[in-house]
Image: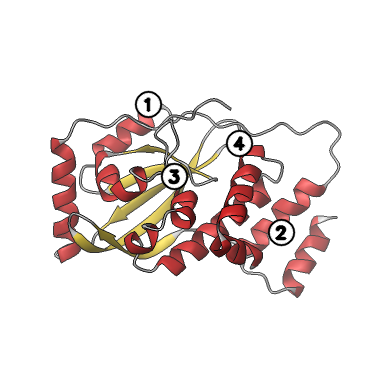
Amino acid sequence: MSEDVVEAVAQALRLDEDERTCLFDLARAARPARRTPSRRKDVAVPPRIQWLLDSMTMSSVFVRNGRQDVIAHNAPARALHAPVFDSDTTDKHGRPNIARYIFLDAGAQEFFVDWEAAAVATAGLLRAEAGREPHGKDLRELIGELSTLSPEFRSRWAAHDVRIRHDGIKQLWHPEVGELELSYQSLGLPMTNRAVHDLTFYTAEPGTTSEDRLKLLAGLAATQPHPAQPTEGPR
């Protein structure tokens, strides 16, 4: 299918920008290739990125891949997202997966005050990743696991919503400091081997109770031993 045809379909369906991007990704993946396409492999986060994360002491910052694995983080991120890191859904390498936490850990509905919005956004982000990497074995296994174990995921996956950009306001309920209202922003983090990672920041509006509570968590994190970083693990 030519790009002109795909564009015409996108216009006829009145797709938004994220849906249009996903449609083009799927169309490219469906084209016959002259050679076997290379699989996109996970790559480790370079030390300079970890240094950048660690230099940010008053904001929660982490790196995740397209499957929603948290593969690097700073100390405030570990403190803010303690329920996610401490969940039974975190893998043996110490790497949380946000999608698994949201759909397979009952505590997520308390941690994310607007759990429904978090669930819709997460399913949409996975749908976008499926468009970018339709042959990804790890992604297929994750979607299969969530579809098997979570009726909530199945219903949202069936909606075919797509989410690429990830930003806005999020309310969290933290077991140590209570409710926080935070701004979050995700930025693309170019990596080698076609890996798709993003850098996600959580910050609080200056002068608010949420800023005070985020500072408290950051202060507590600074007094704790530096946690081991999640690893990519064998593939």
Q: Is residue 7 left or right of residue 197?
A: right
Residue located at (29% from left, 43% from top):
78
**What kind of residue is marked 1?**
Pro
Mark 3 in CB contact with mark 1 (< 8 angstroms): no
Q: Earlier in the sequence, mark 1 or mark 4?
A: 1
Look at mark 4 in the image and give the residue it sits on: 194
**What kind of residue is marked 3?**
Thr
Label 3: which secondary element: loop
Structural distance between the alpha carbons of marks 1 and 4: 19 Å
Mark 1 in CB contact with mark 2 (< 8 angstroms): no
Structural distance between the alpha carbons of marks 3 and 4: 27 Å
Q: Earlier in the sequence, mark 3 or mark 1?
A: 1
For residue 80, above or below residue 208: above
Residue 11 position in % (x across, y down): 73, 71
Q: Earlier in the sequence, mark 2 or mark 4?
A: 2
Q: Earlier in the sequence, mark 3 or mark 2?
A: 2
Which is nearer the eye, 206 or 96? 96
The residue mark sitting in front, 3 or 2, is 3
Look at mark 3 in the image and give the residue it sits on: 89
Look at mark 1 in the image and give the residue it sits on: 47
Structural distance between the alpha carbons of marks 3 and 2: 31 Å
Say if residue 208 shows up in the picture. Answer: no
**What kind of residue is marked 2?**
Leu
Residue 86 position in % (x across, y down): 33, 43
